Amino acid sequence: MPGLLGKKIGMTSVFSADGKNVPCTVVEVGPCVVTQIKTIEKDGYEAIQLGYMDKKEKHTTQAELGHFKKASVTPKRHLAEFKGFEEEYKLGDEITVDLFSNSKFVDVVGTSKGKGFQGVVKRHGFGGVQQTTHGQHNRLRAPGSIGACSYPAKVFKGMRMAGRMGGESVTIQNLQVLKVIPENNLLILKGSLPGAKGSIVIVNK
């Protein structure tokens, strides 16, 4: 589906027409530049590769420099492919937030905040299984049993245990578009988005 790369600016709130205070997220979407056009004849599928945010040439590999030079654009920090654009674009064309001017809802893909190594209470919402009486003092947040002891004598796959939490790709669907501000490349969406301030997100129609 068609979309653009953007950056999460932060959260704020706006008042709706009926006077309700609505929490929303401000996203800087684009402008994105067409860096490659993929065709069925050459690549086996149709898609458009977009680049977002400039970066210095000294931080760019020679292969990447050649790739961007072919499109006659400056080196870009982030690249992503999108399908289903209604208009035809050429190499070097710029696509702005106006793409969403007629959209009421969008899907956003982002990377959630990393939480590090966490226990089962925070990671999976366990309530703790041990009683607090009879001198218990250090087993209140324990996971409890993780499997049978005699048969099948193994721990099943998918058992919810402690481990690394966050830092995963998260998709939020059907976020309402409250406002599009084309002069500042801003998109105001209802609700929250995954990731920290300044993180890169993909906004799809």
Image: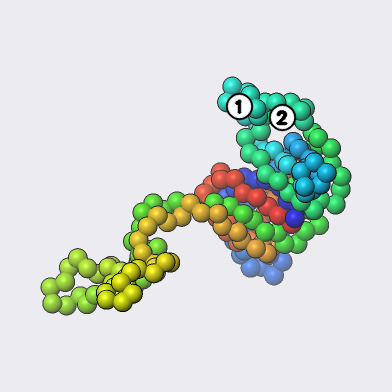
2 and 1 marks in contact (CB < 8 Å) = yes
Q: Is residue 72 above or below residue 188?
A: above
Please give the label number shown on residue 168: none
Image side of residue 183 versus residue 192, left or right: right
Please give the label number shown on residue 60: 1
In this view of the protein, which residue sits in the foreground, 33 or 37? 37
Q: Secondary structure at mark 1?
A: loop
Q: Earlier in the sequence, mark 2 or mark 1?
A: 1
Give me the residue at 84% from left, 41% from top.
89
Q: Amino acid at mark 2?
A: Phe
Q: Which quarter of the picture shows residue 134?
A: bottom left
Give me the residue at 66% from left, 33% from top.
76
In this view of the protein, which residue sits in the foreground, 128 or 146? 146
Q: Which quarter of the picture shows residue 14?
A: bottom right
- State the residue position of label 2: 68
Check disc 1: other Cα within 10 Å, few if <14, some if 14-19, many if 20+.
some
| Tally of numbered discs | 2
In which quadrant will I find the N terminus?
A: bottom right
In which quadrant will I find the C terminus?
A: bottom right
In this view of the protein, which residue sits in the foreground, 203 or 143? 143
Check disc 2: other Cα within 10 Å, few if <14, some if 14-19, many if 20+.
many
**Residue 199 x, y percent position in the rendering:** 56, 45
